[in-house]
Image (cartoon, grey):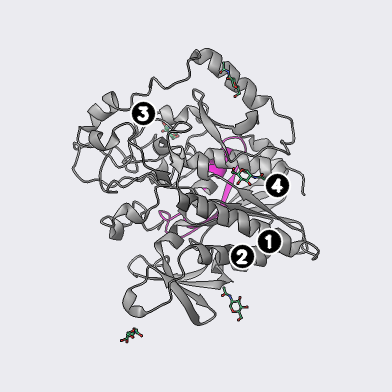
Amino acid sequence: MGASYQPLDSHNHHKPSSKNPPCFVSKPVCALLACGFVSLALLHLLCCSPAGAQRPAFSPLLQYINNTYYSVSSVPGGDEGCNYSEGRWVWSPGYARRYNATECNVKESHDCLRNGRPDTGYLDWRWQPAGGCPLPAFDAGAFLSAVRGKHVAFIGDSMARNQAQSLVCLLGAAFPSRLVYRDADQHKHNFWRYAFPAHGVTVSFYWNPFIVKATGKSEDESVRENHVHLDTPGDGWGADADTIDVAVLGASHWLLNGAIYYNGSEVIGAHNAPAELNYTGVGYAWPLKMAYRTAVERLSSSRPRTVVLATFSPAHFEGRPSDSPTACTKMEPYEEGEKELDWICRELRDIVYDEAEAARARSAGGGATTRVEVLDVTKLAAMRPDGHPSVYMHRDPFAHGVPERMYSDCLHFCLPGPVDTFNEILLQILRRKRR
Ligand SMILES: *[C@@H]1O[C@H](CO)[C@@H](O)[C@H](O)[C@H]1NC(C)=O
Ligand SMILES: *[C@@H]1O[C@H](CO)[C@@H](O)[C@H](O)[C@H]1NC(C)=O
Ligand SMILES: *[C@@H]1O[C@H](CO)[C@@H](O)[C@H](O)[C@H]1NC(C)=O
Ligand SMILES: *[C@@H]1O[C@H](CO)[C@@H](O)[C@H](O)[C@H]1NC(C)=O
Ligand SMILES: *[C@@H]1O[C@H](CO)[C@@H](O)[C@H](O)[C@H]1NC(C)=O
């Protein structure tokens, strides 16, 4: 149903969140741990007041005008030289209020407004890339024109789904759409496709948390192990691969949690498997590389195609128990310098860059015209501890008081929310000229 620390998975409620890399070297910030012992209402008042003193000293109006100017002043067609991966979140009131998630059928646990999240400051930020590079606001018409007549497929874990649903909402707010199909279990949202008939565009999501073929836990929650075939594309997208024009691949979380890995019928190693099985430990980095490699090779072809490799988007439990109602209650982004990206996050991000580079090197000289790009969201996602559903993954979670134990989602993002920025950057990648 999601990553193994995904909220609705009842088997995992008691799992420690320590496997879940925080992505940050912790520093005492906002005394959040201390606040955990205060009631939630107090916490909201005392600890993370949305009108925090850290705001830039400019008047909100001036800031707003400035933001609006910067976000529309970009060169049409995208900025060839821009690197969107570094930057900071800039206060921009209402910037992220772009659609009604209930109307575009997002997973209910990500529909934070519907679920009654009272603080909406997380919708008041835009990503400002470093070096003064402009990142234009999402433009549905520009996106659909850039992929006219094409099949855009998201393949991966529940963060890939979070981004796919964001895209359907961003596009659907401006253009008519039609649901082509979705999985029989409507609460799972694991396989679906939407059409945008005016531009002949289809957008699909394929639930493949390891990207490659996997059996076991990812298909059936009651199974303990994942069995992952590093040499074989996932069943659903593998069968459709020849129809895919733009593929966005995103996986990491399940590889961190571990699996038993196969090449053909032979076990080649495992990560986090029971010691008594005597498998060779292969960690998470090498299997992640192999999974991306197998997918890029399957998607390489002689017709033009774009494969976008998304980097790791970290969770923000930060050592707190995931069944605590205050596991992630921060109400503002981190500021530049407040936290450093930790080495696991950098390592996972570097793997994606390396595999993209390796794929370009392999195709150089050959007949393949597949373009491979990196969608680097690690830093911008890591800066947004405030953007997760937290306890607002259920409608009105405090209707019966504040319980001691309540699961928080500190991994996925609210829709609308910070994940919409992933698609703003994706649009710029797709508009760029082929290299
Ligand atoms: C306006 O935006 C630019 C670029 O982001 C920034 O350097 C400048 O400080 C901003 N000015 C105000 C008044 O916010
Ligand atoms: C963009 O910045 C990231 C992070 O600093 C870096 O790893 C990457 O190589 C840069 N990308 C390009 C195309 O320069
Ligand atoms: C979203 O739409 C639903 C149904 O149309 C409506 O009931 C709800 O109030 C809307 N939510 C917001 C946040 O506008
Ligand atoms: C699987 O085995 C084949 C044949 O020995 C080899 O070429 C390939 O690199 C192996 N793949 C992995 C992921 O180990
Ligand atoms: C694992 O290794 C131990 C010690 O060599 C052996 O006793 C045991 O049978 C092995 N287990 C399996 C499943 O092969």
Residue 393 in which image quadrant = top left
- Magenta range is 165-193
Query: In the rendered image, which residue does mark 3 sit on?
Result: 119
What's the distance in space between the residues labelled 3 and 2, CA to CA?
42 Å
Examine the rendering and report whether any part of residue 154 can be seen. Answer: no
* Residue 293, numbered label: 2
Q: Quick check: marks 1 and 2 in contact, CB under 8 Å?
A: yes
Q: Residue at x 53, y 39 (%)?
A: 420
Q: Nearer the viewer, residue 338 or 137?
A: 338
Query: Disc 2 marks which amino acid?
Result: Arg
Q: Earlier in the sequence, mark 4 or mark 1?
A: 4
What's the distance in space between the residues labelled 4 and 2, CA to CA?
24 Å
Horizontal side, residue 182 vs residue 131: left or right: left
What's the distance in space between the residues labelled 3 and 4, CA to CA?
36 Å
Q: In this view, does 151 lie above or below 138?
A: below
Q: Please state the quadrant of the image where ligand 3 appears.
A: top left
In what element is the residue under mark 3? loop
Examine the rendering and report whether any part of residue 410 can be seen. Answer: yes
Query: In the rendered image, which residue does mark 4 sit on?
Result: 147
What's the distance in space between the residues labelled 4 and 1, CA to CA?
22 Å
Q: Position of residue 250 (x, y in %)?
A: 54, 55
Query: Disc 3 marks which amino acid?
Result: Asp
Q: Earlier in the sequence, mark 3 or mark 4?
A: 3
Closest to the camera, between mark 4 and mark 2, is 2
